[in-house]
Amino acid sequence: MKQVVTIGELLMRLSTQQGIPFSQTTALDIHIGGAEANVAVNLSKLGHPTRIATVVPANPIGKMAVEHLWRHQVDTAFVVEAGDRLGTYYLESGTALKAPSVVYDRQHSSFARHKSMDWDLSELLKGIRVLHVSGITIALSTFWLEMVVKIIREAKRNGIKISFDMNYRAKLWELEAAKRAYQQLLPLVDYCSAGQMDAVAFFEISSETTDYYQAMHDKYPNIELFYATKRTVISASHHLLQGHLWTQGECWESEEYAIYPIVDRVGGGDAYTAAVLHGILSEWRPDETVKFATAAAGLKHSIHGDINPFDEKTIADFAADKSRAIVR
């Protein structure tokens, strides 16, 4: 199977139980995640050798995060131990009419404060077919923006495809700063996770444009494939989810999944990204890829935690089974 490397911050998520706000909780559930780490784990579950370049503190919390990667067979040879803090965020779980809410505590984390290049890029990129990164990483510091651009340029020189999830987070940086940073990366990207809101905000495409994927491609013809999900929110517990994948001038859509009740939506986008990359690396047709990826994202909503633990057969069987009957 083809190898993938990701660059990004490992995070500890502390979540309330559904129906309990921060002000009333007496316990928090712990999960290890982070956008790029989730993609690496999910791809490992789908059979791809994966590695991650990241920074964690040299303490028991950092070790807990690394052991999470070990359990899911992600290569940790490029995990640097430095600093004192693992990035953390708190999630007030949504239910019914109450939307989920996130509070970040990652500003002075080991990853965010890191200021040195600790990796031999020839070793980091050896045998790699795809490098995946998200807008979250480049939002954390000027150093990480510069470092990611440098690593991407080296990857391009080695014929490695670049996957970029725009993943804009308003709580991490201002829209204009994100736009300037994205403009440095987008000319180097091959596969891009971007939807209609991204087209308007970052590609400067009119909201009235119907074929916004083609319009984004016209702006950056180097991007050969766009992918995104369309989510209709009925309530915090009930969403409609449909996958889109655009390539070679055509947009492919999946069936729409009605997800109710949602157990945990965190990591749904990362499940979709990993499954799209799996389809690309497996040389599937676009219609096969978008069907599989949407099923993967839908399944992720049914379990707690940031990762999607299902293998290819489980996801494919789910996508093919319309009855949702018990498996005996």
Image (cartoon, rainbow, N blue to C red):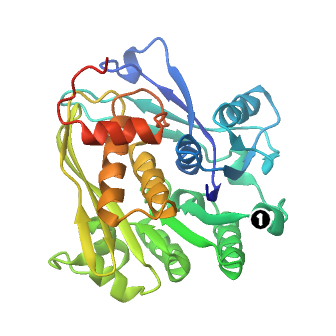
Image position of 54 (left or right of 94) = right
Where, quadrant-wise, is the C terminus in this rendering?
top left
Q: In which quarter of the image is residue 119?
A: bottom right
Q: Residue furthest front?
A: 328
The count of marks equals 1
Frontmost residue, 249 versus 12? 249
Whole-percent x and y of residue 98?
A: 23, 31
Frontmost residue, 274 versus 7? 274
Residue at 19% from the left image edge and 75% from the top image edge? 207
Residue at 28% from the left image edge and 74% from the top image edge? 200
Q: Is residue 266 visible?
A: no
Q: Is residue 228 visible?
A: yes
Where, quadrant-wise, is the N terminus in this rendering?
bottom right
Q: In which quarter of the image is residue 65?
A: top right
Q: Badge 1: few (under 14), some or many (20 or more) residues near its Cα, within 10 Å? A: few
Image position of 29 (left or right of 288) = right
Image position of 242 (left or right of 16) = left
Amino acid type at image mark 1: Lys
Image height check: is 282 above or below 292?
below
Image position of 83 (left or right of 185) = right
